[in-house]
Image (cartoon, grey):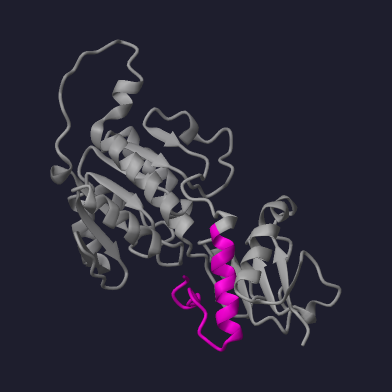
Amino acid sequence: MRPLRVLFSAPTERWAEWETPLREAFQAQGLQVELATAFDDPASVDYIVAAPNGPVRDFSPYSRARAVLSTWAGVESFLANPTLTQPLTRMVDPGLVEGMVEYVVGHVLRHHLGMDAHIVNPEHRWEPTPPPLARDRRVAVLGLGALGGAAAEALARLNFAVSGWSRSPRDMPGVICHHGEAGLRAVLAQAEIVVLLLPLTPHTDGLMNAERLGWLPRGAVLINPGRGALIDDEALLAALDSGHLAHATLDVFRTEPLPAGHPFWTHPRVTVTPHIASETRPSSAARMIAENIARAEKGEPLLHLVDRERGY
């Protein structure tokens, strides 16, 4: 029996950091794999490990491929590709989750403690006003999937008063869970700090528009490490300019890299971070990919299979 043929489709510079972890992960699963960045016959490929910005744009020649395994958590660009008809899995990986939790907790604590005023204090103001305790700070997490759920639970363990919102009902310890449009308004209306960790779908594109930003209490803070298109940029700038929102910490944007002339760069109430909240780490992500291919070869269901109707 010939080895499985696995195609790696990602920007050229990523091959060096992925090749060894993938080979080691396949070996650990007992898989005989021929791994390459190209094959002469696309129809001979069994699986495709792909980044959305990889070189494969037309998936139709890969007629034998049993699955496309994304190296990213976000799969909206794959779903917009009509040639990708193979089963598609999204990346859910312990390293990805840990990185996101660290980013969210760090920036929630930063805003909760008012650290910016102490770090940048050119007038040497002495204002010994302590922040409230975490139990008195209302934090909302929109999106309670693998990333959002882990972030919400971590914040709850730090004793924050955490509310969560998702499209479908959820139940998790320490988090008051809501769903549906009425639930979204209830969550936003009391949130002092909001974290966006929703997938980008037709239902969530532009979710945080002028109306919904207006549901937030005056002085609220918005943190977005999820997807840039969750926010209406003009509405956010207007809410910041009016003082309705105190600050926005943004890690993702509609256009990346964020254009040099974009007003987010210079706005005094915006912090820009360059899409660093949670990067896929090949050392741990490769193990998840190998496990999924091993499951498929044993006839078991793929993990983290994307529901094309829901968009994630």
**The image quarter in which residue 245 lies:** top left
In this rendering, the answer to whether 105 lies above or below 25 is: above
Q: Is residue 93 left or right of residue 157?
A: right
Report the label total.
0
Q: Residue at x 84, y 77 (%)?
A: 41
Q: Residue at x 29, y 39 (%)?
A: 109
Q: Residue at x 39, y 40 (%)?
A: 249
**The image quarter in which residue 143 lies:** bottom left
In this rendering, the answer to whether 34 lies above or below 232 is: below
Q: Is residue 307 magenta?
A: yes
**The image quarter in which residue 151 lies:** bottom left
> Which quadrant, please, contains the N terminus?
bottom right
| Magenta highlight range | 284-312
- Residue 224 place in picture, x, y as percent: 40, 48
Residue 71 visible to the viewer? no
Q: Is residue 245 magenta?
A: no
In this rendering, the answer to whether 79 lies above or below 71 is: below
- Residue 251 place in picture, x, y as percent: 46, 44
Residue 76 visible to the viewer? yes
Front residue of this view, candidates 302 and 111 = 302
Front residue of this view, candidates 14 and 79 = 14
What residue occupies the far right of the structure in this picture? 40
Front residue of this view, candidates 241 and 292 = 292
Q: Residue at x 22, y 59 (%)?
A: 185
- Residue 117 place in picture, x, y as percent: 29, 23
- Residue 242 place in picture, x, y as percent: 29, 34
Q: Is residue 140 left or right of residue 39?
A: left
